[in-house]
Image (tube, grey):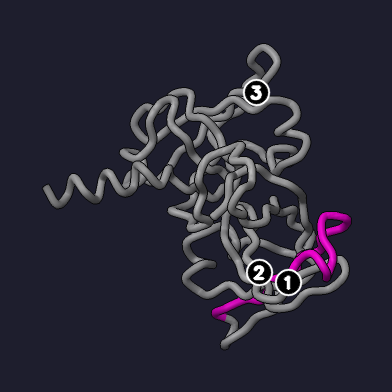
Amino acid sequence: MFTGIITGRGTVRDVVPLGAARDMRLVITTGGWADGARIGLGASIACSGCCLTAVEVGTDFFAADASAETLAKTTLGRWRPGTRVNLERPLRVGDELGGHIVSGHVDGVAAAVSAAAEHGSVRWRFRVPAALARFIAAKGSIAVDGISLTVNEAEDDVFGVNIISHTAAVTSFAELKPGDPVNIEIDMLARYVARLQERV
């Protein structure tokens, strides 16, 4: 489990094909964010919202394997050397819960529609796959590339969030452009409520 509060940025160093090139090993440099003593082999790390397992750890990098399913259902299949990645370690019992409960299980890929300055922040709008739209509600929580955000408005398959300058500076919003794909994880509570309603 994660909170959606990004604690560092990494950079994809290598993308190595595995299993007849259907799976991939991603090698991500971490800079000062972590070292071999702080990330253990087998540790879970949220990488732009996708929970991955560290299969190799160095002083300034870790490697994680991504299956064909993960590559197809997230933005990870588009990652290349140089791609910047949001990083978050898993939540520990007793940690401050600054965002919301995030599982690291990406529900789908959305597209950035627009960005417009609004007072001291920027209003970003995203278009989600139609199947996910019913789970997104105004003032609810959503994770965009692993970042815990509050939904300001939701209409049909488009929702909007406001990004303050600090968030833009320390996350992937620093490089995001309209048209770019992002990983989306809907609020866990919405997912379970919808499933329960199906069984009533």
Classify 49 as above or below 178.
below
**In this figure, which residue is indicated by the disc labeled 2?**
43
- SS at mark 2? loop
Question: Who's the residue at 57% across and 58% down the image?
Answer: 50
Question: Who's the residue at 56% across and 43% down the image?
Answer: 144
Residue pushed farthest front? 94
- Depth check: 58 or 171 in front? 58
The residue range painted magenta reads 22-39
**In this figure, which residue is indicated by the disc labeled 3?**
122
Estimate the spatial distance between the alpha carbons at disc 1 and disc 2, rounded to whole Å.
5 Å
Q: CB under 8 Å between callouts 1 and 2?
A: yes
Estimate the spatial distance between the alpha carbons at disc 3 and disc 1, rounded to whole Å.
37 Å
Q: Tag 2: residue type?
A: Ala
Where is residue 42 shown, x and y percent of the image?
Answer: 65, 75
Magenta-colored stretch includes residue 4 = no
Where is residue 160 shown, x and y percent of the image?
Answer: 50, 28
